[in-house]
Image: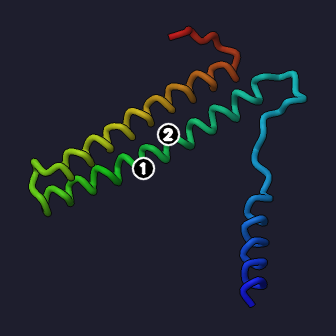
């Protein structure tokens, strides 16, 4: 019984790993395809990070009501929200750079 349930669990896990990921076009001579995919990835990550920042901001407000504005919980959560915000902005910047490269525009080095 235990072996059977472990086998079912393992098959379920392996099925989740079998989904092919979007890969870069290694055979293509057109680098704009890769830059578009990279830009899409950075846009998606930026959206996820913005959402996490918003969630942490809401949580900080809740913690303020529970523990007071000078609580370590509030300060730490605000720092985490700011960290997510900064990461989201950086991901948006990188997405823009790769989008520019995909469209053939020159990109200045930082």
Mark number, residue 51: 1
Residue shown at the point (38%, 33%) measured from the top left: 86
Q: Is residue 6 above or below residue 93?
A: below
Q: Which SS class for mark 2?
A: helix
In the picture, measured across the screen, residue 77 lies left or right of residue 4, that is left
Residue shown at the point (72%, 86%) measured from the top left: 2
Mark number, residue 82: none
Q: In the rendering, at what x and y percent does residue 102 appear?
A: 70, 23
Residue shown at the point (27%, 48%) measured from the top left: 77
Placement of the N terminus among the 4 image quadrants: bottom right
Q: Which SS class for mark 1?
A: helix
Residue 18, quarter of picture: bottom right
Q: In the rendering, at what x and y percent does residue 20 appear?
A: 80, 52
For the residues labelled 2 and 1, say whether their Cβ atoms are less than 8 Å apart. no
Residue 109, quarter of picture: top right
Crowd band around label 1 with a 10 angstrom C-alpha radius: few (<14), some (14–19), many (20+): some
Q: In the rendering, at what x and y percent does residue 96 appear?
A: 56, 25
The one of 102 and 66 positioned closer to us in this rendering: 66
Instruction: Write down the residue under mark 2.
Output: 46
The one of 12 and 83 positioned closer to us in this rendering: 12
Q: Is residue 65 above or below residue 30?
A: below
In the picture, measured across the screen, residue 47 lies left or right of residue 28, that is left
The one of 78 and 99 positioned closer to us in this rendering: 78
In the picture, measured across the screen, residue 50 lies left or right of residue 82, that is right
Q: Earlier in the sequence, mark 2 or mark 1?
A: 2
Residue shown at the point (78%, 77%) measured from the top left: 7
Q: How many marks?
A: 2
Q: Is residue 77 above or below residue 29?
A: below
Residue that protrudes farthest toward the right in the picture: 27
Q: In the rendering, at what x and y percent does residue 80 appear?
A: 32, 43
């Amino acid at each position: 019984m235990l072996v059977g349930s472990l086998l079912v669990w393992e098959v379920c896990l392996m099925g989740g790993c079998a989904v092919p990921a979007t890969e870069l076009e290694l055979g293509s001579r057109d680098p704009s395809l890769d830059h578009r995919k990279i830009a899409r990835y950075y846009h998606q990550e930026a959206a996820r990070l913005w959402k996490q920042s918003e969630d942490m901001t809401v949580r900080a407000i809740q913690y303020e009501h529970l523990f007071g504005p000078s609580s370590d919980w509030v300060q730490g959560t605000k720092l985490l929200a700011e960290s997510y915000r900064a990461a989201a902005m950086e991901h948006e910047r990188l997405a823009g750079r790769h989008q520019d490269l995909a469209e053939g525009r020159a990109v200045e080095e930082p």
